[in-house]
Amino acid sequence: MHLAGDGEKRGGCKSRQENRDVNTTDWDSKMDFWTALVIKSCRDRGTVCVSLRELNRSFRRKEKSPLGLATVVQTMARCGKIQRESEFAANVDCGWLSWGVGLLLVKPLKWTFSTLLGSSGVPLEESFVVIELVKEKAAELLRVYRSSEFASRSILSFQELCTLSSDVCADESTLCMALLQLQRDKQVIVSLHEGEKIVKFCQPGQDRVSLVSDVDIGIYQLQRSEKLLGERVEKLGFEAVKCREEAKLLLREGKKSQALRCLRGRKRVEKRADNLFAKLESIRGILDRITQSQSDKMVMQAYQAGVAALRLSLKDVTVERAENLVDQIQELCDTQDEVNQTISSGVTGADEDMDELEEELKSLLDETKPDSVSGLPEVPTNGLRPSGEPSLPGDDLLSSLPAVPYTHLDITSEQLEEELNQLTLTDSGFQQKKMTSPAKGLEPAL
């Protein structure tokens, strides 16, 4: 397949199919490249639909268009990346949404009934929806609605939605395709009320949008009345200010009668504005009550769900079973206490056995002491000093010593000096000569 506009004729579809059978890898690579390029071109233009004529115009180079674009369109259709507008609208669940409602959106579109697959070519005007892009637009449209001032309103008019989505959808056709995708996702529903198309959005917390009910229509009418009354009150306010300014101007010019007429007109305008404002406040009060009732309904539904869940969770729970379980728990606790007490008593007996073993070991050590120790005399414990004398510090030690002899030795000082002279100093050091003790050589005098 050639996509470079090299002058190849368009009639060789069969030969190009045979080329894919010859080189499948090269064929698929080219298809992936051109598929991504077509999607990028549509995204850059902000549209979700494409036709062969638009592709020829977008990829024209040097007054020539790629010859294989029709084959690219057919391949994308076979892969499910694009779909004809008529088929895309017909795929909306007919059991959930009637064909009449579907026609409200596809009426601005151009319906074609030519056969795509198996035909010799693709009509130039055939419009196809790029599935990837329409899903992106649908998600972006839903995000814009939920972040706008209309998020509290479940129903909007089609014109209000067109104004709201002007930055998202480039034209009405793109908006219709996005709404069809949201209808397929069960996020919006399009209806007709008094010749006007209205769109109902799925509210937060809901999985899918519900059908438009009489309550929804009543709330929508009240909201429209509120909007119209608000606009009229604002307009009357501007008129009252304008009348006052004109009265000032006429008074400066000296036209007192005309100034009085302007002031009377201002009074009438203010009175009308007050009446409309009172009606507006009544409508707002009704809407507030409806909102509160819806909140109360949600709370009641939550209460009912909670009661049902609680009843289900307490289905097998009775007072008797609770008392039985408490008794079983008490018995188990008593058993555990007994086990702990038994274990503790076993440890205490082991300690007593250890004490007995230590006493026996001590007695064995006493029996193995040497016999010589037992033959010694006992150490005196009583002092030798008479019991009548007072004891001083250290008296116990002195009392244990032998008594000092009081016998007088018969020796003179001359004898002591003679013994002292016997101690002489020698050259090799000090030498002390042996001498006989006077106590040993003399006998005590009688």
Image (cartoon, rainbow, N blue to C red):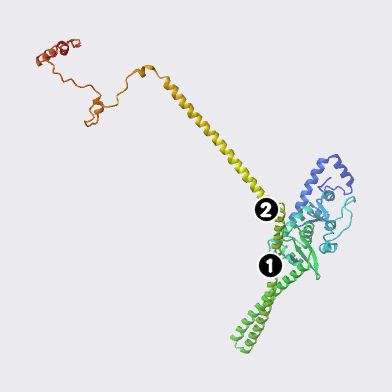
Q: Is residue 272 above or below residue 19?
A: below
- The answer to the question of whether label 2 and label 1 lie on touching residues, with beta carbons closer than 8 A, is no
Q: In this rendering, which labeled residue sits more in front, label 2 or label 1?
A: 2
Q: From the viewer's perspective, tell me whether residue 255 is left or right of residue 355.
A: right
Give the labeled residue for mark 2: 319
Residue 152 visible in the picture = no
Three-letter amino acid code of the residue under disc 1: Gln
Task: Please tell me which residue lies in front, 438 or 330.
Answer: 330
**Which image quadrant: the N terminus?**
top right
Residue 245 found in image quarter = bottom right
Observer-nearest of 50 and 230: 230
| Neighbour tally class for label 1: few under 14, some 14-19, many 20 plus, Cα within 10 Å | few
Q: Residue most toward the bottom? A: 257
Secondary structure of residue under mark 1: helix
What residue is at 64 percent from the left and 48 percent from the top? 326
Residue 206 appears at what percent x and percent y?
73, 59
Picture residue at 50% right of the left edge, 31% below the top: 352
